Image: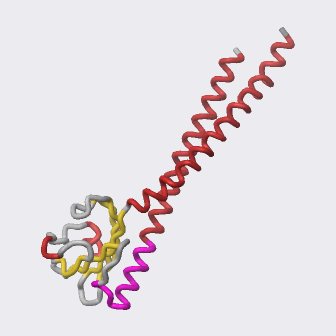
Amino acid sequence: MRQKINRRFTGIALFSVAITTIVMTMVFYSQLKKQVFSDLAVVADLLTDEGFYERKTDNLRITLIDADGKVLFDSTVDEQSLANHLDRPEIAEAISSGTGMGIRKSDTLSESVFYYAERLENGQILRVGREAHSVAAVLLSALPMVLTTALLLAVICLLVSHYLTSAIVKPIDEMA
């Protein structure tokens, strides 16, 4: 009986730790995603204000697209080789509402990219993208701490479940 109660307490505790770890990782990723899009919006605004559309950068992909979807400039690839961009979700959203965001695997870069697009006063769209490997690197760097915390919580839960099992069974053992 003692082992059965202890196993159930342990199971509940480990399940709770696992769910908490998963939920916290999802919350962390969500917050990180919001921060990346916020940063991209600031960069797009700065580029728009300063007129530095055609500036090459290491960390960002900058694309200038005309109202018909033709790529006028791309900081990563030759714009002549790029297809029409009107079908890109962030571009369509920027055309209809002024700004657009999206995350997808880039056909050109073969990596997941966060995109932020902004419609300019002249009708062109300025799109700024950031490769997702930097976001994944942040998540991976946090993973050891998350797993260590989950392991520590699991050990504490095991000790508490053993104590609670003893406390529950002790009066029964004394009566027997």
Rendering coords of residue 93 (x, y %): 29, 72
Task: Reply above or below: 2 against 118.
Answer: above
Rendering coords of residue 33 (x, y %): 44, 63
Question: Magenta region, mostly helix, strand or loop?
Answer: helix
Rendering coords of residue 130 (x, y %): 36, 68
Quarter of the rendering containing residue 53 = bottom left
Left or right of residue 161, residue 56 in this image: left
Left or right of residue 121, residue 137 in this image: right
Image: magenta residue range: 38-54
Q: Nearer the viewer, residue 124 or 110?
A: 110
Task: Reply above or below: 165 against 40.
Answer: above
Residue at figure coordinates x 51%, y 51% from the top left: 25
Quadrant for the C terminus in the image: top right
As for residue 53 lying within the magenta part, the answer is: yes
| Residue at the extreme top of the image, as rendered | 176
**Does the rendering let one see residue 112?**
yes
Left or right of residue 96, residue 16 in this image: right
Residue at figure coordinates x 31%, y 80% from the top left: 56
